[in-house]
Amino acid sequence: MRVAEKTFDTLLVEQLDRVLRITINRADRRNALSRAVQTDLIDAVEGAAGDPSIHAVVIRGAGKSFCAGYDISPASGAEHGGAEISLPRRAMETVNMARGWSRIWNAPIAVIAQVHGHCLAGGTDLALHCDLVVAAEDATIGYPALRMGGTPPTNMWLYHVGAQWAKRLLFTGDTFTGRMAEKIGFALEAVPAERLDDHVLALATRVAAMGRDIVAINKHVLNRGVDLMGRALLQDMAAPMDSIANMAPEMAAFQARAAEIGLGPAFKERDAPFAEGVPLDVQGKST
């Protein structure tokens, strides 16, 4: 069965000429990434790569956000904190999840992330494993979850924004706008939100006008260049370190506080010391 004809539990797929547009369809959860979402995304992208009628893929989110992060609810299928989960088991779960994103990175077809609304934590892991990122100017992007523990389990930040910007953002968990994403290299472009759909589809259509094999070979060569800079090795280091860093005392304190006052108020307390001046924006632009 062709991928455009398949039904996914967590995605909507539509073929627009030579472009497959994938929409994460969990607007009620702000498109949080469960195991099922990641599995469906990988299946859809790899299915597109195997379909000669499809030359490019767009990934976007339904509703008000691209993706607000990893789904940490008990129903998500992920193994998170808790004394009953050993550190080695937790680390291997994270390694396997990180390697799943590499399957999108290495799929022999161009993949474009269409980012609007919130693109946080795991949402950035997804976006940075696409070949191109196009953001709405007013999108809010970042990894604020680091304020209570962890490290990005794939750590693609270094290869997109460079060492200093990666440190600036990961040392604080600060968020930034789509305009700022364009400036620092997280995104290729930032466009007004109302133009995002049309702009991304036009770009995908332009890429899709190329021969599939030509794009696949160029992607392979460029990706191997990034691997020569250590991407795959860094990912295999970062994923288990994420599990270790999530055992920081700040995480235990946050979990205790969330149990006491609720998750929403606990997030507000966590972010209060960082509230001024975020999201980061380009000079002269309001947030």
Image (cartoon, rainbow, N blue to C red):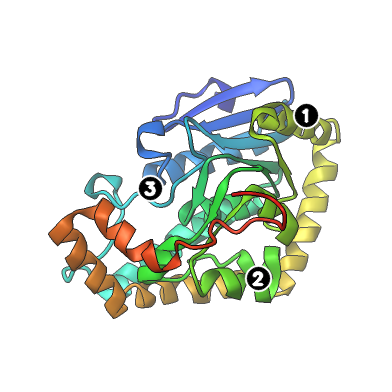
Q: Which mark is residue 202?
A: 1
Badge nearest the viewer, 1 or 2: 2
Is the residue under label 2 in contact with that under label 1 (CB below 8 Å)? no
- Report x, y in % for residue 180: 67, 55
Query: Which of 80 and 39 lies nearest the eye of the viewer?
Result: 80
Q: Which mark is residue 165?
A: 2
- Report x, y in % for residue 274: 45, 66
Q: On the image, which quarter does residue 36 sit in?
A: top left
**Type of residue at label 2?**
Trp
Q: Which mark is residue 35?
A: 3
- Left or right side of 102 for 207: right
Q: Quadrant of the N terminus?
A: top right
Query: Which of 284 and 5 lies nearest the eye of the viewer?
Result: 284
Residue drawn at 61 percent across, 64 percent down: 156
Tell me the SS state at disc 2: helix
- Left or right side of 203 for 173: left
